[in-house]
Image (tube, rainbow, N blue to C red):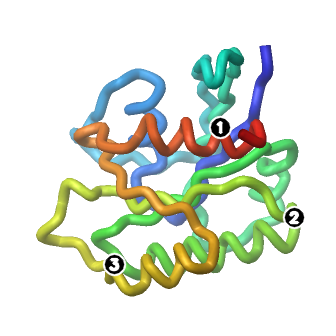
């Protein structure tokens, strides 16, 4: 069975942990926001194109400052979900800056840009024109909701297919 390390990247409070929980355990906990300290690792076996693949999900703390320790957690990753909160425009710009730093250090890897919290349509701040610009520049963008589950499976499956070269 193939194993692929997937990192969840983005600043604090964009929903990285909630996306992992929705994908792995099919649940959403909205009680209280808890900051991830360090890294949490989960596994989820999936089947794609007749291949059994285990995604090893590294939920890395949302770090707004690029740290040397943080970079060591990225070693060995096969791809990543770059997560931003669609209700906070700045988290998208911060995520893109983070992506530039990751790419400069790790090289080009499969990645999907996830704009999370799409269930909060009345609070959405990311302009369609910005999304179009990013899509034109090669980003696959998915609107997700860890709360409702919308496009969560699709995000991980799309990334897994990209990592497998399919």
Q: Residue 92: percent from the left, percent from the top?
A: 47, 75
Quadrant placement of the C terminus:
top right
Identify residue for label 3. 126
Residue at 66% x, 46% y: name it.
7
SS of the residue at dot 3? loop
Identify residue for label 1. 160
Q: Do the CB atoms of the residues marked 1 and 3 lie less than 8 Å apart?
A: no
Identify residue for label 2. 107
Quarter-wise, where is residue 151 in the image? top left
Q: Residue 50: percent from the left, percent from the top?
A: 66, 16
Res 13 visible: no
Q: Residue 115: percent from the left, percent from the top?
A: 41, 62
Quarter-wise, where is residue 88 in the image? bottom left
User: Viewer-nearest of labels 2 and 1?
Assistant: 1
Q: Earlier in the sequence, mark 3 or mark 2?
A: 2
Residue at 86% x, 48% y: name it.
75
User: Viewer-nearest of labels 1 and 3?
Assistant: 1
Q: Earlier in the sequence, mark 1 or mark 3?
A: 3
């Amino acid at each position: 069975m193939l194993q692929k390390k997937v990192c969840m990247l983005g600043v604090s409070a964009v929903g990285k942990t909630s996306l992992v929980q929705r994908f792995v355990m099919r649940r959403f906990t909205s009680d209280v926001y808890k900051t991830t300290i360090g890294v949490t690792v989960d596994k989820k076996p999936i089947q794609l194109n007749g291949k059994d693949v285990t995604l090893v999900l590294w939920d890395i703390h949302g770090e707004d400052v690029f740290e040397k320790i943080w970079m060591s957690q990225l070693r060995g990753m096969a791809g990543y979900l770059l997560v931003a909160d669609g209700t906070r425009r700045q988290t998208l710009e911060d995520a893109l800056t983070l992506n530039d730093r990751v790419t400069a250090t790790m090289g080009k890897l499969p990645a999907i840009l996830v704009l999370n919290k799409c269930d909060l349509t009345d609070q959405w701040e990311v302009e369609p024109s910005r999304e179009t610009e990013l899509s034109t520049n090669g980003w696959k963008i998915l609107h997700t909701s860890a709360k409702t589950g919308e496009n969560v499976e699709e995000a991980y499956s799309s990334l897994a297919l990209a990592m497998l070269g399919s």
